[in-house]
Amino acid sequence: MERADKKNQNFMHLIRRVHGLVENPDIEKQRRSQDHIGEILSNTRDIRYREIDIDGIYGEWISVNRAHMKKYVLLHCHGGGYSTGSSIYARTLTSKLAASTSMDVLCFDYRLAPEYPYPAAAEDAMKVWDYLMLLGYGARDIILTGDSAGGNLALSLALKLKSQGRLLPRGLVLMSPWTDLTSSGESFETKAEVDPVLDSDYIDKMVAAYAGEKDLKDPYISPLFGNFEGFPPTYIQVGENEILLSDAKRLHRAFVEANVSVKMDIYPGMWHVFQMSPVKAAREAMNRNAEFIYDICR
């Protein structure tokens, strides 16, 4: 057991160093570094990427290079604190989602803060949702997925669809979702020393860039404060060692209280969006994502 803990600590230290290399005060350089990592880690013959333009929004279809299911589609909202991230960087997740489910994944580049603060990303997400409707998909043919800020965006989109009286997606899959921009969860303190990826200063900068002076308890900004009655089945994954642990746990509790079918897995020793990393837990998590999606698509 001691040996396993030591190995995990060493890997956490490595994750902290890699994240430090990508993080850059120059936000444009940080965005380019992320894209570079996405291109390197997603270079495989097993996956095909097809670029598309959705009314001025860059997007890409991610598909396995073999016969696969066409009935359902995964609409993925990438993470990055609403200030960084892209479809290319998200390939570290979308390629795994496509491979594990044998379903097509659509990822898109919503406008980023601080150049485009709230509600730009939310408007773009709705535009992409409507694009899928025009292609002939029904709401029940779509599984919304998202990591970190992308989990926030997926929830915000579902809440907006609900407020408009529209049909909701078949289900949601959320990886380390950022649900509360007020940063009021206890894990911001209890996990501050062990989280190798996020810290309060970084979160505060992202919040300021995205939401500015707006009400941080607005459910479309902090979905944790939304009304989830009538929401579709949802699966949440979160790492034990991340400051957003409370964001996931409190969301899970809110879903239970709203009588939503919800499942959450907390991965021991793992960090924020560990599914991107080449570790056994990431492979296991992706398999569980696929199992959940298969279950709700029966």
Image (cartoon, rainbow, N blue to C red):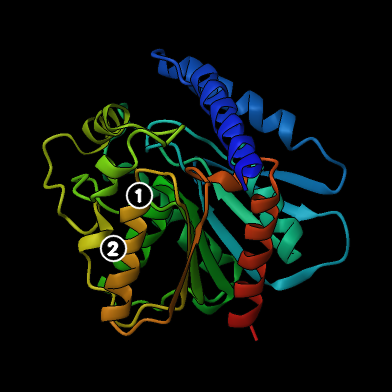
Q: SS at mark 1?
A: loop
Q: Amino acid at mark 1?
A: Trp
- Residue 69 image offset from top left, x and y in percent: 76, 71
Mark 2 vs mark 1: which is more N-terminal? Answer: 1
Question: Residue 267, relative to residue 56: is it above or below?
Answer: below
Question: Residue 287, relative to residue 238: is it above or below?
Answer: below
- Residue 84 image offset from top left, x and y in percent: 44, 31
- Circle 1 Cα neighbour tier, 10 Å, few/some/many (<14 / 14–19 / ≥20): many
Q: Nearer the viewer, residue 266 or 99?
A: 266
Question: Residue 205, relative to residue 269: is it above or below?
Answer: above
Distance between mark 2 and mark 1 Cα atoms: 11 Å
Q: Which residue is mark 1?
A: 178
Quarter of the figure that contains the C terminus:
bottom right
- As drawn, the label of residue 250 is 2
Q: Going 51% across and 77% down the picture, which residue do you hit?
A: 170
Q: Amino acid at mark 2?
A: Arg
- Residue 44 image offset from top left, x and y in percent: 83, 40
Q: Going 52% across and 53% down the picture, which residue do you hit?
A: 268
Q: SS at mark 2?
A: helix
Q: Going 60% across and 35% down the picture, which residue do you hit?
A: 6
Residue 52 in sight? no
